[in-house]
Image: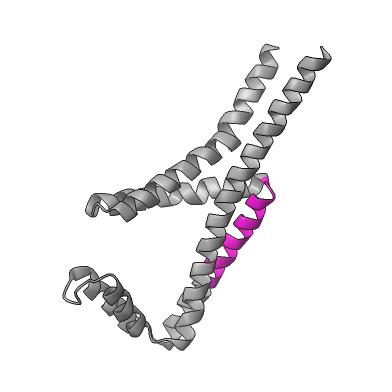
Amino acid sequence: MHAGSNTELVVMRAGHHRRLHALRTVALMEFAKGLAALAAAISLYWVDPSDVVDAFLEFLHISPDHHFAQMLLRSADFLGNASMWWVILVACIYSGLRFAEAVGLWRARPWAEWLALVSGAMYIPFEVVKLAHRVSLLHAGILLINVAVVAYMFYLRIYLPRLQKFVAHVR
Protein backbone atom coordinates (compact mmCIF):
# COMPACT_ATOMS: atom_id res chain seq x y z
CA MET A 1 0.00 0.00 0.00
CA HIS A 2 2.86 2.34 0.80
CA ALA A 3 4.47 1.88 -2.63
CA GLY A 4 1.18 2.74 -4.35
CA SER A 5 0.86 6.01 -2.45
CA ASN A 6 4.47 6.91 -3.36
CA THR A 7 3.65 6.33 -7.03
CA GLU A 8 0.58 8.57 -6.71
CA LEU A 9 2.71 11.26 -5.09
CA VAL A 10 5.31 11.12 -7.88
CA VAL A 11 2.56 11.37 -10.51
CA MET A 12 0.97 14.32 -8.68
CA ARG A 13 4.32 16.13 -8.43
CA ALA A 14 5.03 15.58 -12.14
CA GLY A 15 1.58 16.95 -12.99
CA HIS A 16 2.18 19.97 -10.76
CA HIS A 17 5.51 20.67 -12.46
CA ARG A 18 3.94 20.42 -15.94
CA ARG A 19 1.13 22.75 -14.86
CA LEU A 20 3.58 25.25 -13.38
CA HIS A 21 5.73 25.13 -16.52
CA ALA A 22 2.69 25.76 -18.76
CA LEU A 23 1.46 28.61 -16.55
CA ARG A 24 4.88 30.23 -16.55
CA THR A 25 5.07 29.98 -20.32
CA VAL A 26 1.75 31.83 -20.59
CA ALA A 27 2.97 34.29 -17.94
CA LEU A 28 6.02 35.12 -20.07
CA MET A 29 3.78 35.74 -23.09
CA GLU A 30 1.54 38.05 -21.03
CA PHE A 31 4.60 39.87 -19.68
CA ALA A 32 5.88 40.36 -23.24
CA LYS A 33 2.49 41.78 -24.32
CA GLY A 34 2.59 44.15 -21.35
CA LEU A 35 6.11 45.28 -22.22
CA ALA A 36 5.16 45.85 -25.85
CA ALA A 37 2.12 47.93 -24.86
CA LEU A 38 4.15 49.95 -22.36
CA ALA A 39 6.95 50.56 -24.87
CA ALA A 40 4.42 51.68 -27.47
CA ALA A 41 2.74 54.01 -24.96
CA ILE A 42 6.00 55.56 -23.79
CA SER A 43 7.29 55.97 -27.34
CA LEU A 44 4.20 58.04 -28.23
CA TYR A 45 5.46 60.73 -25.87
CA TRP A 46 8.67 61.26 -27.86
CA VAL A 47 7.86 60.04 -31.33
CA ASP A 48 5.40 61.42 -33.85
CA PRO A 49 2.77 58.71 -34.52
CA SER A 50 2.92 59.42 -38.28
CA ASP A 51 6.65 58.66 -38.28
CA VAL A 52 6.00 55.39 -36.43
CA VAL A 53 3.33 54.36 -38.94
CA ASP A 54 5.60 55.26 -41.88
CA ALA A 55 8.45 53.17 -40.42
CA PHE A 56 6.05 50.29 -39.66
CA LEU A 57 4.68 50.29 -43.21
CA GLU A 58 8.16 50.47 -44.68
CA PHE A 59 9.33 47.60 -42.46
CA LEU A 60 6.42 45.43 -43.65
CA HIS A 61 6.87 46.57 -47.28
CA ILE A 62 3.30 47.87 -47.43
CA SER A 63 2.60 50.58 -49.98
CA PRO A 64 1.20 53.83 -48.52
CA ASP A 65 -1.52 53.57 -51.19
CA HIS A 66 -2.84 50.33 -49.65
CA HIS A 67 -6.19 50.59 -47.79
CA PHE A 68 -4.67 49.33 -44.51
CA ALA A 69 -1.84 51.86 -44.79
CA GLN A 70 -4.26 54.72 -45.40
CA MET A 71 -6.30 53.70 -42.35
CA LEU A 72 -3.18 53.67 -40.16
CA LEU A 73 -1.97 57.01 -41.51
CA ARG A 74 -5.37 58.63 -40.85
CA SER A 75 -5.37 57.22 -37.34
CA ALA A 76 -1.87 58.59 -36.70
CA ASP A 77 -2.91 62.03 -37.95
CA PHE A 78 -5.95 61.94 -35.66
CA LEU A 79 -3.79 61.58 -32.55
CA GLY A 80 -3.55 65.09 -31.20
CA ASN A 81 -2.05 65.93 -27.82
CA ALA A 82 -5.25 65.33 -25.84
CA SER A 83 -6.20 62.07 -27.54
CA MET A 84 -2.57 60.92 -27.43
CA TRP A 85 -2.63 61.15 -23.61
CA TRP A 86 -5.77 59.00 -23.56
CA VAL A 87 -4.08 56.43 -25.78
CA ILE A 88 -1.04 56.44 -23.49
CA LEU A 89 -3.25 56.06 -20.41
CA VAL A 90 -5.23 53.16 -21.89
CA ALA A 91 -2.01 51.45 -23.05
CA CYS A 92 -0.53 51.82 -19.55
CA ILE A 93 -3.67 50.37 -17.95
CA TYR A 94 -3.62 47.47 -20.43
CA SER A 95 0.06 46.95 -19.69
CA GLY A 96 -0.58 46.93 -15.94
CA LEU A 97 -3.31 44.33 -16.40
CA ARG A 98 -0.95 42.12 -18.47
CA PHE A 99 1.80 42.48 -15.81
CA ALA A 100 -0.63 41.59 -13.00
CA GLU A 101 -1.84 38.56 -14.95
CA ALA A 102 1.77 37.49 -15.63
CA VAL A 103 2.69 37.68 -11.94
CA GLY A 104 -0.46 35.80 -10.96
CA LEU A 105 0.16 33.06 -13.52
CA TRP A 106 3.82 32.80 -12.50
CA ARG A 107 2.64 32.16 -8.94
CA ALA A 108 -0.14 29.80 -10.16
CA ARG A 109 -2.93 31.92 -8.69
CA PRO A 110 -6.47 30.83 -9.61
CA TRP A 111 -7.63 34.43 -10.20
CA ALA A 112 -4.93 34.84 -12.85
CA GLU A 113 -6.02 31.63 -14.56
CA TRP A 114 -9.58 32.99 -14.67
CA LEU A 115 -8.31 36.32 -16.01
CA ALA A 116 -6.32 34.53 -18.73
CA LEU A 117 -9.38 32.44 -19.64
CA VAL A 118 -11.77 35.38 -19.87
CA SER A 119 -9.42 37.90 -21.51
CA GLY A 120 -8.14 35.34 -24.00
CA ALA A 121 -11.67 34.21 -24.89
CA MET A 122 -12.70 37.83 -25.53
CA TYR A 123 -10.07 38.16 -28.28
CA ILE A 124 -10.99 34.97 -30.18
CA PRO A 125 -13.98 36.40 -32.13
CA PHE A 126 -11.90 39.39 -33.27
CA GLU A 127 -9.05 37.12 -34.32
CA VAL A 128 -11.44 34.86 -36.27
CA VAL A 129 -12.89 37.88 -38.09
CA LYS A 130 -9.39 39.16 -38.81
CA LEU A 131 -8.37 35.75 -40.16
CA ALA A 132 -11.55 35.48 -42.24
CA HIS A 133 -10.88 38.92 -43.71
CA ARG A 134 -7.28 38.17 -44.61
CA VAL A 135 -5.67 34.78 -44.16
CA SER A 136 -2.08 35.06 -43.02
CA LEU A 137 0.35 32.87 -41.13
CA LEU A 138 0.68 35.55 -38.42
CA HIS A 139 -3.08 35.76 -37.80
CA ALA A 140 -3.43 31.98 -37.84
CA GLY A 141 -0.55 31.59 -35.39
CA ILE A 142 -1.96 34.19 -33.01
CA LEU A 143 -5.38 32.54 -33.14
CA LEU A 144 -3.96 29.06 -32.52
CA ILE A 145 -1.85 30.21 -29.57
CA ASN A 146 -4.79 32.08 -28.06
CA VAL A 147 -7.14 29.11 -28.50
CA ALA A 148 -4.53 26.84 -26.88
CA VAL A 149 -4.17 29.19 -23.89
CA VAL A 150 -7.95 29.52 -23.49
CA ALA A 151 -8.43 25.75 -23.81
CA TYR A 152 -5.75 25.08 -21.19
CA MET A 153 -7.21 27.63 -18.77
CA PHE A 154 -10.66 26.10 -19.37
CA TYR A 155 -9.18 22.70 -18.55
CA LEU A 156 -7.61 24.00 -15.31
CA ARG A 157 -10.48 26.15 -14.06
CA ILE A 158 -13.60 24.33 -15.29
CA TYR A 159 -12.98 20.80 -16.56
CA LEU A 160 -10.45 19.55 -13.98
CA PRO A 161 -12.41 20.66 -10.88
CA ARG A 162 -15.57 19.02 -12.23
CA LEU A 163 -13.65 15.83 -13.00
CA GLN A 164 -12.15 15.78 -9.50
CA LYS A 165 -15.58 16.34 -7.97
CA PHE A 166 -17.00 13.47 -10.05
CA VAL A 167 -14.15 11.11 -9.09
CA ALA A 168 -14.57 12.00 -5.41
CA HIS A 169 -18.31 11.35 -5.68
CA VAL A 170 -17.75 7.94 -7.33
CA ARG A 171 -15.30 6.81 -4.63
Position of 100 with respect to 2 (left or right) is: left
The N terminus lies in quadrant: top right
Residue that appears at 60% across and 56% down = 101
The spot of residue 126 in percent (x, y) is 35, 53
Q: Nearer the viewer, residue 165 or 7?
A: 7
Tell me the quarter of the picture where residue 169 sits: top right
Residue that appears at 69% across and 50% down = 107
Residue 115: in sight, yes or no?
no
3 above or below 16? above
The spot of residue 16 in percent (x, y) is 68, 36
Q: Nearer the viewer, residue 153 or 83?
A: 153
Q: Nearer the viewer, residue 81 or 42?
A: 42
Residue that appears at 42% across and 86% down = 47
Magenta range: 92-109
Residue 101: in sight, yes or no?
yes
The structure's colour scheme is one colour
The spot of residue 6 in percent (x, y) is 78, 22
The C terminus lies in quadrant: top right
116 above or below 98? above
Tell me the quarter of the picture where residue 164 sits: top right
